[in-house]
Image (cartoon, rainbow, N blue to C red):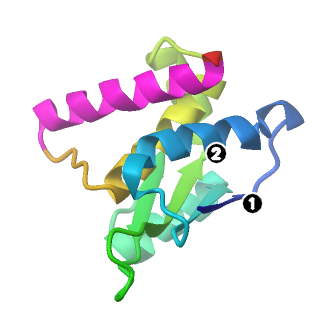
Amino acid sequence: MQINIFYKTKISPYYHKTGIYKKALLRALGKQAKTQSELNVFVVTPQEMLKINTQHLGHRYVTDVITFPYPQTGLKGEVFGDIIVCFEQAKKQAPEAKTSTLLEFLILMVHGALHLVGYDDNTLELRNQMNTLARSIAEQALNS
């Protein structure tokens, strides 16, 4: 499985924990993380996230994470997609979530990956289940 992480904004080198991020993403993708799969994670500025959110989803606000799946014909069960994460939004949300910026940032990446394998968060119950799973996977990756 090919996982690429692109830092399109300046963040402290402390947060360039690509190995940990990849480990968590692989865990989130589970059995669907096959050899031919490819995942790109883009870490962007709030301005870039606003632009993407407005252009692609019609929302005029900065959000924390957006996932774009790319279905591939002929490659059954493979995962292809992009996850866009706003680091500054993760930093802002961390105190509200009573967590560190690093953990919140990783939770958002995992949240995006879970969307790629079929998880949905369009109801409060589903959102809570997804958030619990994302946090668990992120914590495991940070603590192993």
The earlier-in-sequence mark between 1 and 2 is: 1
Report if residue 134 lies within the magenta region: yes
Q: Residue at x 43, y 49 (%)?
A: 29
Viewed as shown, does residue 70 lie left or right of 126? right
Q: Which residue is mark 1?
A: 8
Q: Which mark is residue 22?
A: 2
**Residue 88 within the segment the image draws in magenta:** no
Figure quadrant of the C terminus: top right
Give the class, few, some or many, for how many residues have Cα within 10 Å of label 1's Cα (few <14, many ≥20): few
> Predominant secondary structure in magenta?
helix
Spatial CA span between label 1 and label 2: 17 Å
Residue 111: give x, y in percent of width and height.
41, 42
Q: What element does badge 2 sit on?
A: helix
Amino acid type shown at disc 2: Lys
Of residues 122 and 31, which is closer to you in this image?
A: 31
Residue at left offset 74%, top offset 43%? 18
Numbered range of the magenta stretch: 123-142
Q: Are marks 1 and 2 in contact (CB under 8 Å)?
A: no
Q: Please identify the quadrant where the N terminus is shown.
A: bottom right
In the image, 6 versus 65, the foreground residue is 6
Q: Residue furthest bottom?
A: 73
- Give the image quarter of residue 68: bottom left
